[in-house]
Image (tube, grey):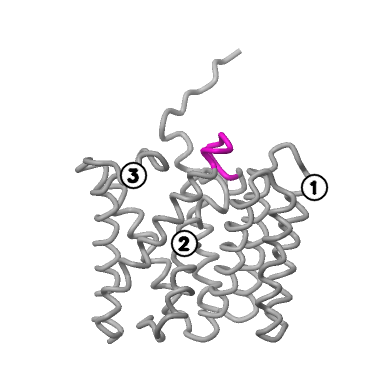
Amino acid sequence: MKPAKKHGRWGDLPKRMLSAAIMLLVGVVEVWMGGVTFAWLVILLTGLMTWELARMQNPRATWVPIGLGLLAAVTLLAILQTPVAVRVVLLFVPSVAAALLSRHHKVAAVYTFAILISGYTLIDLRSEAGTAVIVWLIALVVVSDVMGYFVGRSLGGPKFWPRVSPNKTWSGTIGGWVGAAVIGAIFVVAQNEPWQLILLSPVVAFAGQLGDIAESWIKRRAGIKDSSSLIPGHGGVLDRFDALIGAVVAIMLLSLLFPLPIPDSL
């Protein structure tokens, strides 16, 4: 009998690269097409993320997470078909259900609402502002994460929030802000967007960093490494989109206060 091969730390690299390539391809096509197909993708992801969250909150249950995931997806679909006044009420339905059926009521309610509102906002942004704002958001999240990782690993230094996220440093956090500002500057130069976009980009990126920290905290409380194993080599859907949730929620909240200089053409 031959001994099992030891793949080492890079053993899952091909799997990770394949998953990343598929996600990139699907993402590019869906963002570019927009419309109904983009909305259906967001609805699917909303249901899956709610299911993952409910599994972390209810580790011994099977049907509760499935039911909450389906409820979130159906609710978002219904929201897109109803008047604005009804949408506000519907947004809270999955959150209330999650609070009633989960161990940590407040966490379940708040995070479920964040998932729902970010899904709705993404669809609305793509419909009203076009492709550019979605590309900008994704670029912010990705570049901020990459810059934060490499700057943090290179410089080290004081921890950003040691009790909640022991691995994140101030140097990495600020590195992420700088990367986000660069993305904003690129859009200003290339797309002739308002210069204020350079200031807005780090703010939105910081919200994305907080979204990542929030999901990491929930996983730590649940004693798990990944939200699920749906994406080979990458963990769960929440593991990939936690920062985007934070960024989109920030866009939604800030837009209620004043007009935002977000990209509207590509």
Q: Is residue 266 visible?
A: no
Residue sitting farthest toward the top: 1
Mark 3 vs 1, N-terminal side: 1
Instruction: Identify residue for label 2.
Output: 246
Q: Is mark 3 on a helix, strand or loop?
A: strand
Q: How crowded is mark 2: few (under 14 residues within 10 Å), some or many (20 or more)?
A: many
Alpha carbons under labels 3 and 1: distance apart: 35 Å
**Marks 3 & 1, CB-CB < 8 Å contact:** no
- Residue 91 rendering spot, x and y as whole percentages: 66, 70
Q: Residue at x 72, y 83 (%)?
A: 82
Q: Disc 1 marks which amino acid?
A: Trp
Position of 200 with respect to 232 (left or right) is: left
Position of 58 with respect to 145 (left or right) is: right
Alpha carbons under labels 2 and 3: distance apart: 17 Å
Q: Is residue 22 visible?
A: yes
Q: Which of these two is toward me, 233 or 145?
A: 145
Mark 2 vs 1, N-terminal side: 1
Q: Which residue is drawn at 65% across and 56% down?
A: 50
Q: How crowded is mark 3: few (under 14 residues within 10 Å), some or many (20 or more)?
A: many
Q: Quick check: 141 above or below 229?
A: below
Q: Quick check: 187 above or below 155?
A: below
Q: Which residue is drawn at 48% across and 54% down?
A: 20
Q: Looking at the figure, which quarter contains the N terminus? A: top right
Q: Quick check: 99 above or below 159?
A: below
- Residue 159 rendering spot, x and y as whole percentages: 29, 42
- Residue 122 rendering spot, x and y as whole percentages: 53, 73
Q: Which of these two is toward me, 176 or 256?
A: 256
Instruction: Identify residue for label 3.
Output: 168
Q: Which of these two is toward me, 166 or 105?
A: 105
Instruction: Identify residue for label 1.
Output: 63
Instruction: Report the span colored magenta.
Output: 219-227
